[in-house]
Image (cartoon, helix red, strand yellow):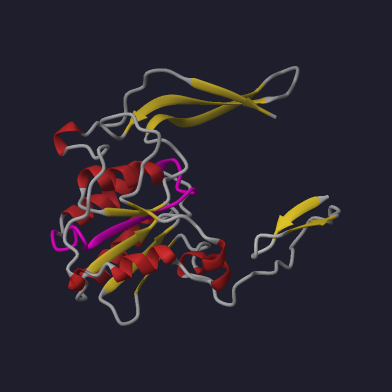
Amino acid sequence: MFTFARADGSTTAVPMRSSATGPQDWILPYKTAPLYIQHSPDEFWFTTLPNTNTVYVAFNSYRHLRSNAAALFRYLDSHVIDRLIIDMRTNRGGDYLQGHKHLIARILERPRLNQPGHLYVITGRYTFSAAMSNAAQFRTETHATLVGEPPGEVPNGYQEHRSFRLPHSHLVVNYSVRYYKFLATDVPALLPDTTIEPDWHDYQAGRDPVLEWIIASSPAKGATEFPRLPNRAHAADRPDGRVCVGASMIVCS
């Protein structure tokens, strides 16, 4: 028996049985999905948003990042662009060094984009591993404004996943071999400059309140600098993030 909450806050209990595996015909609550859901299967996708000089980038995967990022910057350099939005809400990670090399370093070479109110990074609960690391580097090295939810991982902690199977119980042991420090101080989360949490009514309507907030914060309307949180590190304090200090283990079935 499963209990579900309706949009009006009431609940209903429904008995449910397992079904055969295979493709399922999901019933979606919206008629048109927001951009980040529409393009979540894409490794890397970008477009100029209608009636703006804003380029929106769905950065979902590190696969082929070198060529994908090169195409993005060719586009940016050949168009009049006022703002750049990098959406990492569905990025589960990869190689953060590649993210720094092909995205962050290239943005630092373009001062017209690396300005308060002109560069935005969207994070969410599924922003994980290298994606969280690069989001933290956007904070410490650029003038990006972070918007959305905190990533699903702390900025300072163990990474580099390894695993092995116990010989008798056959339980799988997952462990990390390297400690990374991406912010100068230990904090419970990489908190966005503006936190906007998911809302069922927006999801049902196919709206993206995060993107809407950014568009409403247009530089043309006077956006200049945004308040920074205490965990924003000064450039001189940036760690290299590659000091191995031990291992952490968890056991799961």
Residue at (29, 52) in percent of width and height: 102
Start-end of magenta stretch:
111-130
Q: Position of residue 131 (x, y in %)?
A: 40, 46
Asked if residue 223 is positioned above or below residue 103 in the image, the reply reads: below
On screen, residue 164 versus residue 88, left or right, reads: right
Residue, far bottom: 51
Residue at (55, 66) in percent of width and height: 201
Q: Quadrant of residue 54?
A: bottom left
* Residue 16 lies within the magenta run: no
Residue nearest the observer in this picture, 92 or 119: 119
Q: Quadrant of residue 212?
A: bottom left
Asked if residue 253 is positioned above or below residue 196 in the image, the reply reads: above
Residue at (20, 52) in percent of width and height: 143
Q: Main secondary structure of the magenta part?
A: loop
**From the image, which quarter does the C terminus lie in?**
top right
Q: Position of residue 93 (x, y in %)?
A: 45, 45
Asked if residue 226 is positioned above or below residue 39 in the image, the reply reads: above
Residue nearest the observer in this picture, 229 or 235: 229
* Residue 114 lies within the magenta run: yes
